[in-house]
Amino acid sequence: MKFGAQLASQLTPEWRTQYLNYDDMKEMLAQVIEHAPRSFSPTNMMEQPHMDRASRLLVYFAEFEDKFFVYCDKELTKINTFFNEKLAEAQRKLAALKMELRAHFNLSQLGVAEDKGARLSHKMTWFAELMDKDARNAKRMYRKVHDLKLAFSEYYLSLILLQNFQNLNTTGFRKILKKHDKVLDTDKGMTWRIQHVEVSSIYQSKEVDRLIMETETVVTKDLEAGNRSKAMQRLRVPPLNEQAAPSVFFLMGLLLGSFSILLIDLVAVAAVSGLPFDIYTTFNATTNQTTINHDRVDWRIVVRLYRGPFLFIVQLFLFAGNVHGWRSAGVNHVLIFELDPRNHLTQHHIVQLAALFAVLWISTVLAFFHSDAVGVPHYVVPIILPSIMLILLLNPFQMLFSSARRWFLRTLWKIITAPYHTVAFSDFWVADQITSTVQALQDVQYLLCFYAFEVPWVNNGVPSKTSICTSTSHGIRPVLAAIPAWFRFAQCIRRYRDSNLAFPHLVNMTKYSLTFFIVLFATLNALHGEKFPSDPIMHRPVFYCWMVLTVLGSCYSFVWDMRMDWGFLDSSSKEHPYLRDSLVYASIPVYHGCLVLNFFLRFARTFSISTDVFPFALQEVLTTVLAILELNRRCIWNFFRLENEHLNNCGAFRAVRDLGAVAVPRPRPAAPASDTERIRPEQPAAGEQPGREPKPADSKAELFPINFDSPAFAGRDSEDRESGDSSARSRRKSFKAELFPLRGVTVYEIDEPATTSAPKRRSLTAAELFPVNWKPSKAIPESVSGELGLKSHTSQLISDTMLAMPETIEESPDEEYAYAAALNTRTTATNIDHIKTFL
C-alpha cells in the first residue's frame, strides 16, 4: 500500500488537519519536474539572456528547494506544537486518574472489595441490598472500580492514537524527504531531516511509550490484582485498519449466495404456481348443499404480512452501506455514537446479520407458496419470521452480537422515555431512523390485527372480507404514524430544557409538530372516504388542508436538512459554493447530485396524497415503493449528517470523550506553608462581587476540554448561605476554572519580591501556568521563574516548555477540600512528580 493511502486510512479523523500534508508535498515534487524549463523560449531569453539552460535549471531547483523546506518547517512546527499539547493533556489526565484512584480506594484491599461487590451486585435482591448498609457500600465500591477501569481503558486508547500520530508523521517526513532526494538527485532532504526532524520532540520523545507502560502497570497492579493478561485484554486496542475475520466473509458470502438462489426459485414459483388457495366450505340453507370453495389468497394480504420485515432488512443493508462509507471516508462514527472501540459492529457484521434475516424472510415466503404441497396451513408461515426476529433481539444469552443488541435496546428505551433522559447523539439519530419506518410499524400493526380478527381460522375457516385492520376508524394506525414524530418532538423539548436555547431546538420541534397536523388531516380525509365512499377526493375539504400541510412540511424538512443537519448552503464558503468549506467525501458532483436527489425524495411522500385516485390494487404497490424510497433518502441523510457532526459538532453533542477527575477530601498538613511565593486561589478584589469570573485571556481551549462541577462540594452552598460565607461559595463556584482554566482565566496570585516594604502581588494567568504556544507580555521575575521552573519562551521552546509547580501547600481553616491539582512537567520528557493541592 502506498504511504499516502496508508496515512489516509490510519489517521485519527478529529486530528486530520494536524497531520503532515503528505499528498500536497508529493504533488509539489511532481509539479517541479513538470514545470521545469525545457527550452529557450523568447520570453525566457528576454528575462534572463545571460543564463544558459543548465543555469536556469539550477536557479529553478534552488528556488523550489527553498520553498519546499520552508513548507516542511511550517509542517514540522504545526505537528510538534499539536503533539506537545496532546502529550501535556495526556500527562494531566493520567495524574488526575491516579489521584482519584488513590483518594477513593485503599489499594491493598481493592481486589477484595471488587470481588465482594461483584458478588453482591449479582446475587443480592434489591430488598436485601436496601436493608444491608455494608452491602450498599460494597456495591458502590464495585461500581466505582468499574468506572475507573472504563476511564483507564479510554485513556489508554487516547495514548494509542497519540502514538499512532507520532509514528505516522515521523514516517511521513522520512518518506517525503527521501522522495525529494530521489526526484532532485540530491542529499539535502536527508540533511534537513537530520538537522530538523530528528532533533524535534515528535521524533525524540519517548514520553508516550512511558505513559503507555505506566498505564499498563497501574491497571495490572491496582485494578486487576496483578493479572496482566486480564489487564491487557481490557486495555488492548485493535489496529486502526483491522479487517474482519475470514469466517465473517465466508458466512456473509454463503448467506448472500443462498439468498440469490432462493430469490430465483421464488420468482419461478410465483410465475408458475402462483399464490396458494384458500379452501373452505359454505352451506346453502335454501338448497341444503355444502360447497367447497377454492379461492386464491389475496396478494395484497401477503404484501402487508411480509412488507414490514422486508423493510427492516432493507434498512439493515443500507445502514451497512453507511458504515462502509463512513469508514472509507474517515468519519469516526464509533466516537460520535460513543461505541466501544474494542467491540462494535463493522459493516461486514451488519451485512452478515441482514443477509441472515433475508434468507429467513425469503425462506418463509417460499414456504408460504409451497404450503399446499406440504400440507401446512399457509397462514401459519408469515408469523414465523417476526417471531424469530423478536426472539433474537430479546435473547439474553451472549450470542449474535449481544453487546450491540443491548446498546440498541438501551437506546430504544431512552427514546421511548425521551423527556426524562438527556439526549445523546445516538438517541436522536436512532429516533430519526424510526421516523423513516412508519410504514413498517403500520405493517406490524396489520400483522397483529390480522391474526387477531381476520385470519380464516377465527372465522370458521372462511377468509375475512372486511378491512378492519386497514381502517383508521379505530385510531391505531394514525397513532403509529405520529409516534416517531413524538419521539423527536420530546427530545427537542428535553434539549431545550437542558440548553435553554430556543434555536435550534424549538424550531426543530416545530418541524415535527407539523407531522401531527399532517397525520390528523390525513386521518380525517380517510374517515371521510370511508363514510362517504362515493364522494370524489377533490370534494373533501380536509383533503386541501392535508395537501398544503404535506407540501409545507416537505419544504421545511428539506431546508432543515440542507442548512442545519448537513451544514450546506453556507454563504461564507468560498472553496465549495452552496456547500461548506470542509468536506470529507471526495467527489463534489456527488454532493450536488445528493442535494437534488434529496429534494425529490423529500417530496416523494406527497404522492401518498393521491393514492386514492389509483385503483385499490395499485395502492399497495405505490405504498411499498414510497417506503423503499424513504429508506434510501434516510441512507443519504445519514452520510452527510455524520459528516457534519464529525467536522463541526453541529449538534453540540460530545463526539470525543474526555476524562476528568474530581476534587477529593485531603488531610490537613502538619504545618502551614510559607508566606513567600505561595500559590493560592484568587480572592475577590475590593468592590468586586464574589463569584464573578475574571476577564479571560488568550489560551488554548483544546488543552482543557474537561467541563464539570465538583461533586465534592455538593450541598455546601446551602450551608454557606446560612452561615453568610459568600467567599467560600464563590471559590467553589470557580473550582472548574481553577482546575482546568478553559479560557485562560486568571486564577492564581503570587507574592512578588519588591523594593518597598510591602510585597507586591500580581496574578499569574493560565497562559503563564500552562505555557503552550504563547508569548508573555512581560518578563517573569527570576525568583518566580526559579520557583516555578519556567524557562525563557522563545520560538524554539514553544514546543517543549511546560509547567513546574512549587511544593508549598497552604491550608485554610474553614475548608477541607482541595480546590485543584496541578501537574509538574518541566519538559515533555519529564515524569509526573507531584500533584499539588491548595485552598
Image: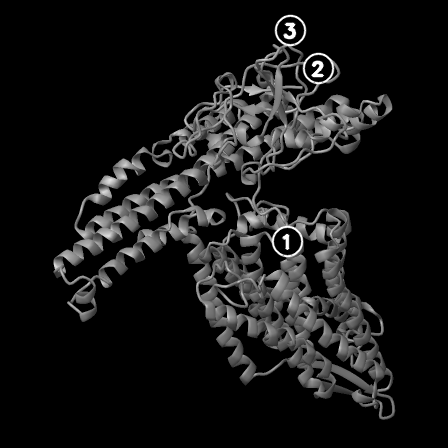
**Label number found at residue 651:** 1
Quarter of the figure that contains the C terminus: top right
- Image location (x, y in percent) of residue 482: 77, 66
- Residue 17 visible here: yes
Q: Is residue 193 left or right of residue 53?
A: right
> Furthest residue to the top?
671
**Label number found at residue 182:** none
For the residue pair 154 and 529, the one nearer the viewer reads as 154
Label 2 SS: loop
Q: Amino acid at mark 1?
A: Gly
Give yes or no for contact between labels 1 and 3 (Cβ–Cβ under 8 Å): no
Please name the residue that numbered disc 3 is placed on. Answer: 670
Q: Is residue 180 left or right of residue 814?
A: left
Circle nearer the N terminus (1, 2): 1
How far apart marks 1 and 3 lie (CA) works out to 50 Å
Q: Looking at the picture, does residue 541 appear above or below residue 821?
A: below
Residue appearing at x 46%, y 26% in the figure: 214
Q: Looking at the picture, does residue 58 appear above or below residue 40?
A: above
Circle nearer the N terminus (3, 2): 3
**Label number found at residue 812:** 2
Mark 1 or 2, which is nearer the eye? 2
Q: Amino acid at mark 2?
A: Ser
Residue appearing at x 77%, y 30% in the figure: 689
